[in-house]
């Protein structure tokens, strides 16, 4: 009982104490709530000296207010949004106070988005440079509405942590021209702190449009972006690349937009001016003295024009593809027509000569057969494109010529036809690879033959035909192997490039002509890819022509035809097959390059151009020097060295003096070594005694006897070649062009043209003639090359500059609204290369009935 009474007294005492302080506290709390409710209803709320002011905002009125850490102002706006009409809302802010320690924070609260920014706005550049902007203008995101008309509210909150009063100006206005109209140009002004964006809605029946933004000012550098209709809109320099498609620009920018990429059938065109110009190739003015120093960016406002135009329809795609196929299929038809006409002419000539060589009874019998419609047999019944076998030569026999009595034979000992026929019957499999470059005679005989003052083709075609045939077939198989191993990684890489462009939206990766870039599927510039079809189709056509000639020649050899065995330029088709394959590969790799053209993959477009130029020079040399022409392994090794220097020059050669010195020295030394090789027909040695022998020859031939060169024609060619190459080396060393790959290609083309011109001149000088078909090919090819080079030098884009500078050269389509200047270059250059190959193939057809000891080497 005692403990119970004690516990009760303690419990009652404790409860009473609690009740003493709890009840007054509850009364105070209720009173404070009432006071708070009353004061908030009047528009002011004060707690810990913090004041919130709410105002009804109106459009197109400038509010001049002051904000401190002790007060916050809320502006409430409302506007009517219509489903059929979109009006933009723009918030402009200007801070009047200077040297702010704490910025002012503006928060715009909308129905489906929140936009916040501070003033001064600090934008960062390279090396963490900081650029402050006190005047800002931002367009509010416009969320779509399903109702015909809806009133939407938004609030602008203004606050700061600065204890000092900060003056600011706030203005909210409507953007009447927020929606862009098709084919109507709209002008506006933008700056880094005042980006602009506009809405475009696809009209009915339009699936693809091209958005073009232009300016008369190179700088400041700007960015155009295409973004979906969603909030927030990324319209600052530091976030514009987050979504959508974008590209930097100076004067021009263009992006093709397809309806399928935007489910809402509309998109935003965003234009942002960058804080620095380095991305567009502009200079960096100065470096910050201190890491935290703020740099005055100056006036970076830019006036721009934007226009949205419908792109081409699907019918234009079809017309472009049909046009491309039609051009090159016409060459197939023309080739077939010429082949039929010449085949018919060859049969007619064979008929007349067979009548002349037969007796009267046989003539009557032959005429009787022909009157029945049957064609008499003839060694020349298998006609080719250029009537390779002359009917006059078919009736001639090859008399044995005594080398001691013939002044024009130059040591040539003709082999009997019996031995030749027997050697043709042997199996090619009996020849070993080690025998490819052997001769029956010894080195001394080589020196005697090759160092004569006047050489004939018979002197340099002494090797077994089976050996040379296999030797030159290696050219084809090697280039086919190179093509497979080269093309597969290229295709994989360009697919990756295109995927990166499509996923990231960064259109600065690829250097297109954006004013005429027509997408198809995942490809961004289908027209540039399609125009390379000519290389493939004409390369295949050339292979078919060479195959026909090869078949005709083999049939003539199997019949022991004298002309095929002992007359004319020796027929070796391996290099021709390699040339046709290289032309096809040029088309494939050029198409791969144009999937995403840039400086890292430019060698895809030029590698096989080097090979084509090299193979053409080798073929020209092989015509008169079949026994001593370079092997496939040596030739491709040299071409690999050229491609290696091309890659090194593209990556490291820009402005690198050491590289250009090294390359120029190698270029000059290679020219001298090749000149020596050509002048002495390979009969010289590169060893420790080379300098002593050079001095001895100069002393004996130039100083002691003062005699001229033994081989005048060769000396003229090599002197001209050295002048050209030394001049090109000096130009490269002085100018150091940025496009090293094109510079290297120019060296190859100049040497090829020089050698080709020399060959034509010497051919005419030697009393040889050029047949009508070859002459037509020469004239046609020269004209086409002239037009092709004109379009090549138009320069619609260039990867030597920044993407923005490259776009300054972009131009509209000029053919069928589908092809641009560079596409026409593809058309014409493929035709010109095909014509050049035909010239090489038919140029010496006039010699098919001439004995090889009557054909001079030059």
Image (spheres, grey):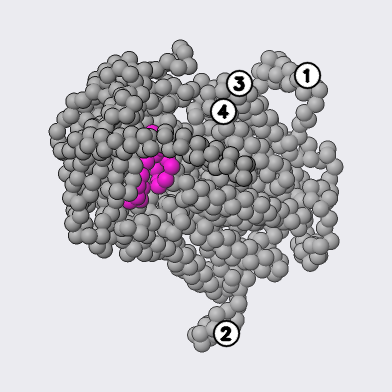
Q: For residue 126, say whether it is visible.
A: yes
Measured along the vertical axis of the image, is residue 532 above or below residue 114?
below
User: Mark 4 Cα within 10 Å, few/some/many (few <14, many 20+)?
Assistant: many
Which residue position is annotated with label 1?
692
Q: Which residues are magenta?
A: 226-247
The residues tagged by marks 4 and 3 sit, at their Cα atoms, a distance apart of 9 Å
Which residue position is annotated with label 3?
658
Residue situated furthest front in the rendering = 1
Which residue position is annotated with label 4?
653
Q: For residue 589, say whether it is visible.
A: no
The residues tagged by marks 4 and 1 sit, at their Cα atoms, a distance apart of 36 Å
Pointer 4 with pointer 3, Cβ within 8 A: no
The residues tagged by marks 1 and 2 sit, at their Cα atoms, a distance apart of 74 Å
Tag on residue 615? Answer: none
Left or right of 379 on screen, residue 344: left
- x then y, percent, for residue 49: 31, 24
Q: Nearer the viewer, residue 497 or 313?
A: 497
Q: Within the magenta stretch, is there residue 674?
A: no
- x then y, percent, for residue 416: 78, 59
Viewport quadrant of the N terminus: top right
The residues tagged by marks 3 and 2 sit, at their Cα atoms, a distance apart of 81 Å
User: Mark 3 Cα within 10 Å, few/some/many (few <14, many 20+)?
Assistant: few
> Which of the two discs, 4 and 3, labels the residue nearer the N terminus?
4
Pointer 4 with pointer 1, Cβ within 8 A: no
Which residue position is annotated with label 2?
365
Q: Nearer the viewer, mark 4 or mark 1?
A: 4
């Amino acid at each position: 009982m005692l403990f119970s009474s004690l516990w009760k007294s303690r419990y009652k005492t404790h409860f009473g104490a609690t009740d003493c302080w709890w009840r007054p506290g509850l009364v105070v709390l209720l009173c404070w709530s009432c006071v708070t409710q009353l004061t908030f209803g009047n528009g002011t709320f004060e707690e810990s000296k913090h004041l919130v002011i709410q105002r009804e905002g109106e459009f197109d009125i400038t509010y001049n207010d002051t904000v401190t850490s002790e007060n916050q102002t809320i502006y409430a706006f409302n506007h009517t949004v219509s489903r059929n009409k979109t009006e933009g809302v723009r918030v402009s802010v200007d801070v009047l106070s200077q040297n702010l320690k704490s910025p002012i924070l503006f928060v715009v609260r909308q129905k489906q988005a929140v936009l916040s920014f501070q003033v001064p706005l600090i934008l960062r550049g390279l090396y963490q440079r900081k650029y402050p902007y006190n005047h800002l203008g931002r367009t509010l995101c416009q969320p779509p509405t399903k109702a015909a008309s809806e009133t939407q509210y938004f609030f602008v909150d203004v606050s700061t942590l600065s204890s000092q009063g900060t003056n600011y100006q706030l203005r909210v206005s409507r953007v009447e021209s927020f929606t862009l109209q098709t084919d109507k140009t709209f002008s506006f002004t933008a700056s880094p702190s005042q980006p602009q964006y506009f809405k475009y809605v696809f009209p009915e029946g339009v699936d693809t449009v091209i958005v073009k933004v232009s300016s008369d000012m190179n700088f400041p550098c700007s960015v155009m972006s295409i973004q979906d209709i969603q909030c927030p809109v990324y319209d600052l320099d530091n976030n514009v690349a987050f979504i959508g498609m974008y590209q930097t620009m100076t004067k021009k920018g263009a992006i093709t937009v397809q309806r399928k990429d935007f489910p809402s059938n509309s998109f935003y065109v965003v234009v942002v001016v960058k804080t620095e110009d380095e991305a567009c190739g502009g200079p960096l003015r100065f470096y910050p003295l201190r890491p935290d120093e703020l740099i005055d960016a100056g006036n970076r406002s830019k006036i721009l024009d934007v226009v949205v135009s419908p792109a081409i329809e699907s019918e234009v795609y079809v017309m472009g593809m049909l046009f491309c196929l039609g051009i090159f299929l016409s060459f197939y038809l023309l080739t077939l027509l010429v082949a039929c006409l010449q085949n018919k002419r060859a049969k007619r000539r064979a008929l007349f000569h067979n009548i002349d060589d037969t007796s009267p009874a046989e003539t009557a019998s032959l005429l009787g057969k022909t009157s029945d419609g049957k064609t008499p047999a003839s060694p020349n019944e298998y006609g080719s494109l250029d009537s390779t076998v002359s009917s006059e030569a078919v009736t001639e026999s090859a008399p044995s010529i005594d080398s001691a009595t013939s002044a024009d034979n130059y040591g040539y000992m003709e082999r009997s036809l019996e031995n030749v026929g027997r050697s043709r019957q042997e199996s090619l499999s009996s020849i070993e690879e080690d025998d490819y470059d052997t001769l029956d005679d010894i080195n001394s005989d080589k020196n005697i033959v090759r160092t004569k003052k006047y050489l004939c083709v018979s002197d340099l075609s002494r090797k077994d035909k089976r050996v040379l045939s296999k030797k030159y077939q290696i050219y084809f198989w090697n280039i086919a192997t190179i093509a497979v191993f080269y093309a597969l990684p290229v295709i994989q890489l360009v697919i990756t490039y295109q995927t990166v462009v499509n996923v990231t939206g960064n259109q600065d990766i690829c250097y297109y002509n954006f004013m005429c870039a027509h997408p198809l599927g995942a490809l961004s510039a289908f027209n540039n890819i399609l125009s390379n079809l000519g290389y493939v189709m004409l390369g295949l056509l050339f292979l078919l022509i060479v195959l026909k000639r090869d078949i005709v020649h083999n049939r003539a050899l199997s019949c022991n035809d004298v002309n095929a065995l002992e007359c004319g330029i020796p027929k070796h088709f391996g290099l021709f097959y390699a040339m046709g394959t290289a032309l096809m590969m040029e088309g494939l790799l050029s198409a791969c390059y144009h999937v995403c053209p840039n400086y890292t993959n430019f060698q895809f477009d030029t590698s096989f151009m080097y090979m084509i130029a090299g193979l053409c020079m080798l073929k020209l040399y092989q015509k008169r020097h079949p026994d001593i022409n370079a092997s496939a392994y040596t030739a491709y090794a040299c071409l690999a060295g050229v491609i290696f220097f091309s890659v090194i020059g593209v990556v490291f050669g820009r402005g690198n003096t050491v590289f250009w010195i090294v390359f120029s020295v190698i270029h000059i030394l290679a020219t001298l070594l090749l000149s020596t090789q050509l002048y002495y027909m390979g009969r010289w040695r590169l060893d420790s005694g080379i300098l002593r022998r050079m001095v001895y020859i100069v002393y004996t031939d130039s100083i002691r006897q003062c005699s001229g060169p033994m081989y005048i024609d060769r000396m003229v060619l090599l002197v001209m070649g050295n002048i050209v190459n030394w001049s090109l080396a000096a130009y490269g060393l002085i100018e150091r062009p940025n496009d090293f790959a094109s510079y290297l290609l120019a060296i190859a083309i100049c040497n090829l043209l020089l050698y080709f011109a020399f060959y034509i001149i010497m051919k005419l000088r030697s009393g040889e003639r050029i047949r009508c078909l070859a002459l037509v090919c020469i004239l046609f090819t020269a004209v086409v090359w002239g037009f092709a080079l004109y379009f090549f030098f138009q320069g619609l884009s260039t990867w030597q500059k920044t993407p923005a500078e490259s776009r300054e050269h972009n131009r509209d389509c000029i053919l069928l609204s589908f092809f641009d200047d560079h596409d026409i270059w593809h058309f014409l250059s493929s035709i010109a290369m095909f014509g050049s190959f035909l010239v090489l193939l038919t140029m010496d057809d006039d010699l098919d009935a001439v004995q090889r000891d009557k054909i001079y080497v030059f």
